[in-house]
Image (cartoon, rainbow, N blue to C red):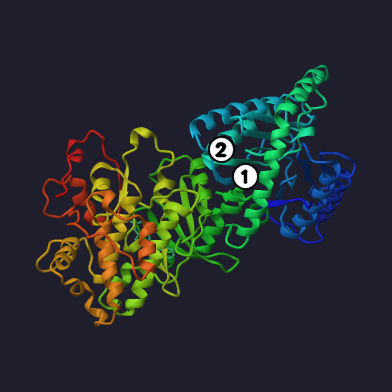
Amino acid sequence: ADPIHLTEVCANTTFNPNSIYQSNLNSLLSSLSSNATQNLEFYNTTSGQNTPNPVYGLFLCRGDVTPQLCQECVAAAVKEVTKKCSREKVAVIWYDECMLRYSNRSFFSTVDEKPRFALLNTQNITEQEKFNKLLAKSMNETAAQASNAPTGAKKYGTKEVNISAFQTLYNLVQCTADLSRNDCSTCLQAAIKLLPWCCSGKQGGRVIFPSCSVRYELYPFYRMEIATLPPTTIHPSSHTGKKKISTTTIIAIVVPIVALVLVFLSFCFLTMRARKKSNAIKGENFKKSDQILNYQAASELTTVDSCLQFDFGTIEAATNKFSEDNKIGEGGFGKVYKGTLPSGQVIAVKRLWKSSGQGVEQFKNEVELQAKLQHKNLAGVLGFCLKGEEKILIYEFVPNRSLDNFIYDSKNQGQLDWAARYKIIGGIARGIQYLHKDSQLRIIHRDLKASSILLDADMNPKISDFGIARILEVDQTQKNASRIVGTYGYMAPEYAMQGEFSEKSDVYSFGVLVLEIITGKKNSNFESEGAEDLLSYAWIHWRDGRPLELLDPTLGGFYLIDEAIKCIHVGLLCVQKDPADRPTMASIVLTLSSHSVSLPTPLQPAFFLRNTDQNLPQMYMESDQSTSMSMSWSINDESITEPHAR
Ligand SMILES: Nc1ncnc2c1ncn2[C@@H]1O[C@H](COP(=O)(O)OP(=O)(O)OP(=O)(O)O)[C@@H](O)[C@H]1O
């Protein structure tokens, strides 16, 4: 079988064609290829050591692959990396069976945990708690076994553990052979720690670093006969004992396993064929392995710092030194500038206020995770930039400004006819659904509002700031856990009062947005006869059987009645006081896209945060002016623990 390509990362420092670096790299790659034919499974070398631009490189084959497969894998890796990273000085490419990397810096005998990525098997496990314990224990034992080999020896370990009479857990760990015992152990521990993060509750998972990797499955994915041999260079006297154990175990374990594996493989093969088309996987690089292994890319962290980290000088140049002419807005988190990269790509640059004290590593990690979230209705994160205390986020530029510029502005309202508004509502719903359920990270936006919905050239909505609460909060200590990010008029009562946020608090904000989009009225600063806020106003019209009177007069009576009623109905259901009475985003998306869906009757919504309510904590009254802010409050503040919703 052909080697299975997983992914590669090319860093953004480049070399010139026909340079010394290029010729050193060429000889490095040919030396790696030829050493793979010498039956070596690990080889590191430096090319051009006496030139100003040496290149350091290595390959590592998985501990159980045959010399021939190792050789084929390295050859494929050389070919592919030359194509994919043709000008980059630093690259790493991973296959199922091998990895190859090179750099302009010497990385031998050092632990590198980045770039890294994870893959998970989409099947769930039962009895998660018991499984997690078993996995942690067996992984640690396998890691200890592999890292025990001395520097230069093969650092590879596998372990099979019975979960039940019918199920076995298979573990595999490996380090590059140049690592010391301690370094290998450190690297494997770091990778094992990430398993719950990527693959909790799943039947298989792997975390892959340049210096080591770990993987587990409920089926044998490595060659058992080689895998059961201990590392060749250590403890030769223990070979016989181990072999005896394996011989007796083989009879008891391997026979049923082989039968199970055959059943499993036939199942996989059939499933794979059936799903081949529908099983669309995010991330081109993972398609092949996903199809073959029924795998789904998990938060595929192709995260090399240099890929996502922009140089401060580049951003300064792109924004004309953060000039006022380039400033496009200012929000609760910082000023936003339009910028143009040397490649011509237009970007939005958010220069965060300097107040936050979060750690750089966690900031980076969070941005890296979020950069992987890709959806038509999200304003994507492209990267970040750090300098001293400066923290800057870089987004794709969305040209048509934010929704608030259209829905509340009497001059622009007319530009949004009914079809445009319905498309915007549907797009926002799909974007939130993706954040809640479909992305590998479960993200609760916490600050949905008209100004966080940007519009592209075709007036498609793109949700912005979707992970900013996480980016700014990731490293906050638990004692400060009640920090609130949110905006007056859009916050669900339980979130504003008790700091409890969930998917359902986003649903509440979505409901407010829907009502604003169709009425052209703002929930905060609401001015209208007969009601004190937009939600009461909508409810009264609904209750009195006059819902269509709610619609924005600038629509001029042109709308589809069914769609308009559906939007009002959904909007009112979303702003119910009890989160359990609010629909999920998935059911909202379904409702908006179907013709006949029966919905429950809405009750009177939660009326909350009205200017006249004297019982409200003072900070909310203040927040009316600043529209959005991060607020910390004391958990013990009595005024907050009393609910005030009517
Ligand atoms: N990716 C982007 N593309 C184009 N314009 C953007 C982008 N992100 C933000 N903007 C513009 O910058 C303005 C300020 O954005 P920002 O997200 O900082 O604040 P906000 O959403 O208005 O308020 P807050 O941050 O307080 O929630 C927005 O109104 C929008 O017009």
List x then y, in percent, for residue 629.
Answer: 30, 51
Q: Nearer the viewer, residue 476 or 415?
A: 415
Answer few, some or many: residues within 10 Å of disc 1's Cα (few below 14, many 20 plus, some between 14 and 19).
many
CB contact under 8 Å: marks 1 and 2: yes
Are there few (<14), some (14-19), or many (20+) residues within 10 Å of tag 2? Answer: some
Residue found at the very far left of the displayed protein: 530
User: Which secondary structure lies at badge 2?
Assistant: helix
Residue 195 image offset from top left, x and y in percent: 56, 37
Mark 1 sits near ligand 1, with its Cβ under 8 Å away: no
Question: N-terminal of the two: label 1 or label 2?
Answer: 1
Q: Residue at x 82, y 19 (%)?
A: 240
Residue 48 shows in the view: no
The CA span between labels 1 and 2 is 11 Å
The x and y percentages for residue 381 are 49, 57
Horizontal side, residue 19 vs residue 126: left or right = right
| Quarter of the figure with residue 276 | bottom right
- The kind of residue on which mark 2 rests is Leu
Along the viewing direction, whichever of 531 and 46 lies nearer the viewer:
531
Give the residue pinned by disc 2.
Answer: 194
Q: Quadrant of residue 227?
A: top right
Residue type of the residue flagged with mark 1: Arg
- Residue 523, x across and y down, in percent: 22, 62
Residue beneath disc 1: 116
The answer to whether any part of residue 127 appears in the image is yes
Viewer-side residue, 307 vs 215: 215
Q: Residue at x 42, y 60 (%)?
A: 431
Q: Is residue 269 above or below residue 594?
A: above
Q: Tell whether 108 sits left or right of 478.
A: right
- 525 to 480, vertically: above or below: below
